[in-house]
Image: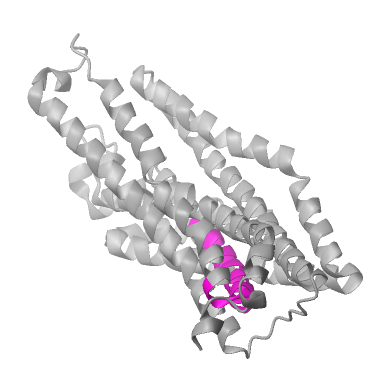
Amino acid sequence: IGFVTEYYTSFSYRPVVEVSESCRTGAATNIIYGLALGYKSAIVPVFLLSLIVYGAHTLAGFYGIALAALGMLSTLATCLAIDVYGPVCDNAGGIAEMCELHPSVREKTDALDAAGNTTAAIGKGFAIGSACLVGLALFGAFVTRLNDTGAKVTVDLLDPLTFAGLLVGSMLPYWFSAMTMKSVGKAANEMVIEIKRQFDANPNLLIPNHPDRPDYDRCIKISTDASLREMIAPGALVMFAPIVAGVVFGTKSVTGLLAGGIASGVQMAVSASNTGGAWDNAKKYISKGAMDAVIGEEEPETVDNTGKVQTKKSQIFKAAVTGDTVGDPLKDTSGPALNILMKLMAIISVVFADVFLAVNKGDGLIASWL
């Protein structure tokens, strides 16, 4: 899983280079190539997870799946280390730029940041894989707990309530991702409006080395307030979906809901994380000068008097920035957050199993209406 993630998110390999080259024809083709890369990157990890589930269950049932999940979670220390590496390098680059250090320093931090994007994607790949296995183990625990009470529950996809739950569960990762991505967009919009307001109110902020300073506290307040406020609705969706399904439609719909959430969530999480990482590194690949020859040929106005290509003034680079901007909420918000959706829905179902059984012996309120 780590190697596949690296292959699809590092500019040392062909997929990210292809995304970079697609920027020659604008941001739209960059978005198309990036989305295709993300969808394709889910193929091998899903096959690997399927083999792990089959092998573990064949050897030791759901206990084996739980052990497989524990095995992936045992890499926690490594995952934390490679996850932290990326933000450290990213912040180092930001500090170098704010301190107006020599451009060569920024080039070095950009190279480190590109490696950090890849390591972060690898860490997310491990986290998504373990979340899938943990969710499946908890799903098994939910069914086992129901059977321990004498309910005799089986997961039958041909049952209409179970299949309906499967469809709804498969939809939940999309609903959840839509909410988190829109939240990022709203917060970013507020931030841009505030920055513009400060520039309009005090044009001196645009003058280099002027003593007037921006109101950083206001911008920090916008982002921190939004990060807390905007997570209420997605959190409520994840917590209340299995409760409503179990109370209203019974345990059969909950089994379908959990199966659909895991099956859809793991693929969407891998795709979102890798798409965002690829777009970020495509921008890094262009900014380090790897496409300067192409830029100089197609956009001669970007070549200065000394013959050096001003990469960041080119339309190719601007197209890459657009992709990176779209990819940030995918790789940093929606993708990693889907891990929580898979695990939290399963654990809430286990906790509320007795409540579900207390409503018409597990058939839900709908049994009273039919």
Q: Is residue 356 above or below residue 24?
A: below
For image coordinates 58% across by 55% down, the residue present is 339
Q: Residue furthest right?
A: 59
Q: Residue 290: image x %, image y %?
A: 42, 46
Residue 93 in sight here: yes
Q: Residue 267: image x %, image y %?
A: 56, 66
Q: Nearer the viewer, residue 28 or 264?
A: 264
State whether the magenta stretch is mostly helix, strand or loop: helix
Q: Is residue 70 left or right of residue 334?
A: right
Q: Is residue 115 left or right of residue 36?
A: right
Q: Nearer the viewer, residue 331 or 104?
A: 331
* Residue 267 among magenta residues: yes
* Residue 330 among magenta residues: no
* Residues shaded magenta: 248-276
Q: Is residue 122 left or right of residue 67?
A: left
Residue 176 placement: quadrant = bottom left
Q: Is residue 289 above or below residue 203?
A: below
* Colour logic: one colour
Q: Is residue 193 above or below residue 332?
A: above
Counting labels gives: 0
Q: Is residue 355 left or right of residue 244?
A: right
Residue 273 in sight here: no
Q: Residue 179: image x %, image y %?
A: 38, 56
Q: Residue 55: image x %, image y %?
A: 84, 71
For image coordinates 58% across by 70% down, the residue present is 246
For image coordinates 53% across by 34% down, the residue present is 112
Q: Nearer the viewer, residue 161 or 25?
A: 161
Residue 304 placement: quadrant = top left
Please state, as top left, top right, bottom left or bottom right, where the N terminus lies in the image: bottom right
